[in-house]
Amino acid sequence: DVKVTQSSRYLVKRTGEKVFLECVQDMDHENMFWYRQDPGLGLRLIYFSYDVKMKEKGDIPEGYSVSREKKERFSLILESASTNQTSMYLCASAYPGGQETQYFGPGTRLLVL
Amino acid sequence: QKEVEQDPGPLSVPEGAIVSLNCTYSNSAFQYFMWYRQYSRKGPELLMYTYSSGNKEDGRFTAQVDKSSKYISLFIRDSQPSDSATYLCAMSASSSGYALNFGKGTSLLVTP
């Protein structure tokens, strides 16, 4: 069964803290993605990775960075959390060219105070 | 103009009704079309996908793509309270790389 897991379901952080969100997939997928989802704005792509140590900026990369040291793990880093980064963060993975079958994790609800 | 437009609803229907959910798009390069279902506080799960134009049926769900009108639909027959969720359309061009273009989602409530 397809499995994408995210390290936390809920997270509360303070402004200025460095925040790590972890995503792990067990499907041997090359492609992994980080989105944020906000009411009225839908899903927006932050970063994606098509291979280990490779990364590409999405639509809203400012204030974020990513790390892909192993194929199964893709981390999103908020260098200095701000209140406007309060959101639902979703990780997804897919086979190369398998754009029609992105599998999503359960999401992390991040609140920055 | 947004590339993918989707009415946010909410849409409320009685149990057993036929539900029609729709998206329009502007990029004629889109070739892959998907519908995701997202329950409250959960991640989206892939429900249906189609390539290019045509229909695809899976149980109570039918996906339609009309590329000439740049319009896609998801029909749910015999709707159930368990179908209450947000439905997201998504689409991709074959040469666009790796990311999907999502609609903002339509919230559906099926009342018993």
Image (tube, coloured by chain):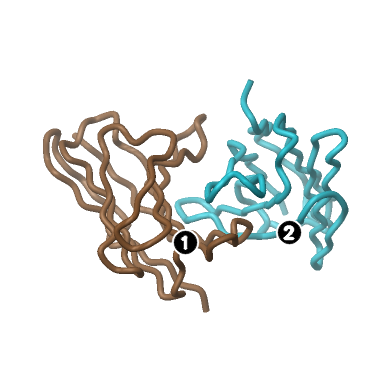
Chain colours: A brown, B cyan
- Give me the residue at 76% from left, 55% from top: B51
Q: Secondary structure under badge 1?
A: strand
Residue sitting nearer the eye, A89 or A10: A89
- Which residue is at the front of the view, A59 or A56? A56
Q: Is residue B69 left or right of residue B46?
A: right
Is disc 2 surrounded by few (<14), some (14 to 19) or many (20+) residues within 10 Å?
A: some
Label disc, if present, on residue A93 of the rendered structure: 1
- Amino acid marked by disc 2: Gln
Counting from the top left corner in percent of width and height, residue B95 is at: 63, 46
User: Is A55 placed above or below A98 here?
Assistant: above
Identify the element where label 2 is drawn: loop
| Most distant residue in the bottom direction | A1
- Tell us which disc is closer to us: 1 or 2: 1
Q: Quadrant of the C terminus of chain A?
A: top left
Q: In percent of the image, x 64 and y 20: which residue is there? A: B1
- Find disc 2 in the rendering and name its residue: B80
